[in-house]
């Protein structure tokens, strides 16, 4: 089974940051990516809807013969992990939350961590719960930042619009004393440098920003190795599927991957 592809899915294009990290760390692994762009964003949907979307995508990936599934979406990881496991027919399932939590715990020096994410991710409290489970007494600040995903999907990066939105969110006084910030959405690495700049200019200290993409890629590597599914040689093949295909998504994808790719439309039952 080691030659089979790994399935990766997200509500939109943010999961391509995970794809890029996996491609760099595991160059021989073939990948099938599914972006549920017809239902973007997941962050303002009900738990029941998200569970249904995630289940449908998982079934599609199982039908396509993947050997493992990566939930490259914080919102789906937070509320639909069990549904994906149930639909995955016994395949290994990885999410983006746990690797980010472990990395944050290993990084913070003053035991003050913040998390930004979609409304649904923050509402679940999953990051705070897991962080404080592993380290009771840790101070955790959570903030929903719902405008960031549509802003990034529109390609509004490194301009005054994006800086104003980032400034409005990061000015929360709860951020003043943290030394570690978890990007609780796979879209957010694209504005990582702007967030870092805000802390230096306004709080006069650097903050360690946890971009879970590399941590997730490492978790996938370790998991595939543990299940004897790791592919050590051979040419990798990539397939990119979207539930709603528009020219805008194709151009936006280049922001995440740094290269142009061809997308195909997929139907989710």
Image (cartoon, rainbow, N blue to C red):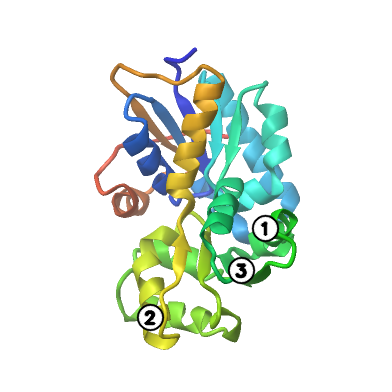
Q: Nearer the viewer, residue 152 or 92?
A: 92
Q: Position of residue 164 (x, y in %)?
A: 41, 83
Q: Position of residue 236 (x, y in %)?
A: 32, 24
For mark 2, give the secondary structure.
Answer: helix
Q: How many marks?
A: 3
In the image, 80: left or right of 35?
right
For mark 3, give the secondary structure.
Answer: loop
Q: Label 1 belongs to which residue?
A: 131
The crowding category of the residue bearing disc 2, from other C-alpha atoms within 10 Å (few below 14, some 14 to 19, many at least 20), is: few
On screen, residue 193 above or below 60: below
Considering only order in the chain, which callout, 2 or 3, is on the residue closer to the N terminus?
Answer: 3
The residue lying at 35 percent from left, 42 percent from top is 20
Question: Label 3 to label 2, Cα distance in Å?
Answer: 19 Å
In the image, 167: left or right of 226?
left
For mark 1, give the secondary structure.
Answer: helix
Can residue 78 be seen in this snapshot?
yes
Q: Position of residue 118 (x, y in %)?
A: 59, 63
The residue lying at 38 percent from left, 80 percent from top is 200
**The furthest residue to the front:** 109
On screen, residue 254 above or below 113: above
Q: Label 3 belongs to which residue?
A: 111
Q: Nearer the viewer, residue 73 or 28?
A: 28
Name the disc covering residue 200, or none. 2
Q: Nearer the viewer, residue 268 or 146?
A: 146
On screen, residue 93 above or below 225: below
In the image, 187: left or right of 193?
right
């Amino acid at each position: 089974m080691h030659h089979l592809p790994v399935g990766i899915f997200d509500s939109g294009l943010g999961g391509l940051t995970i794809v890029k990290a996996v491609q760099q760390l595991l160059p021989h692994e073939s990948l099938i990516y599914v972006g549920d762009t017809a239902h973007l964003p997941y962050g303002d949907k009900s738990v029941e809807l998200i569970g249904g979307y995630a289940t449908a995508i998982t079934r599609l990936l199982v039908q396509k013969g993947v050997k493992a599934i990566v939930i490259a979406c914080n919102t789906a990881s937070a509320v639909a992990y069990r549904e994906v496991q149930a639909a995955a027919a016994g395949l290994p399932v990885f999410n983006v939350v746990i690797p980010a939590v472990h990395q944050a715990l290993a990084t913070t020096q003053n035991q003050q961590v913040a998390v930004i994410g979609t409304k649904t991710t923050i509402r679940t409290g999953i990051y705070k719960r897991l962080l404080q489970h592993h380290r009771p007494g840790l101070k955790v600040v959570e903030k929903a930042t719902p405008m960031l995903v549509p802003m990034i999907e529109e390609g509004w990066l490194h301009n005054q619009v994006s800086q104003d939105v980032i400034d409005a969110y990061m000015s929360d006084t709860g951020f003043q004393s943290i030394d570690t910030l978890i990007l609780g959405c796979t879209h957010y690495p694209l504005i990582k440098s702007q967030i870092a700049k805000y802390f230096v200019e306004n709080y006069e200290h650097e903050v360690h920003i946890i971009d879970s993409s590399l941590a997730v890629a490492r978790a996938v590597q370790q998991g595939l190795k543990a299940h004897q599914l790791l592919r050590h040689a051979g040419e990798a093949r990539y397939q990119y599927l979207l539930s709603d295909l528009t020219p805008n998504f194709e151009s936006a994808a280049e922001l995440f991957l740094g290269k142009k790719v061809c997308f195909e439309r997929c139907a989710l039952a």
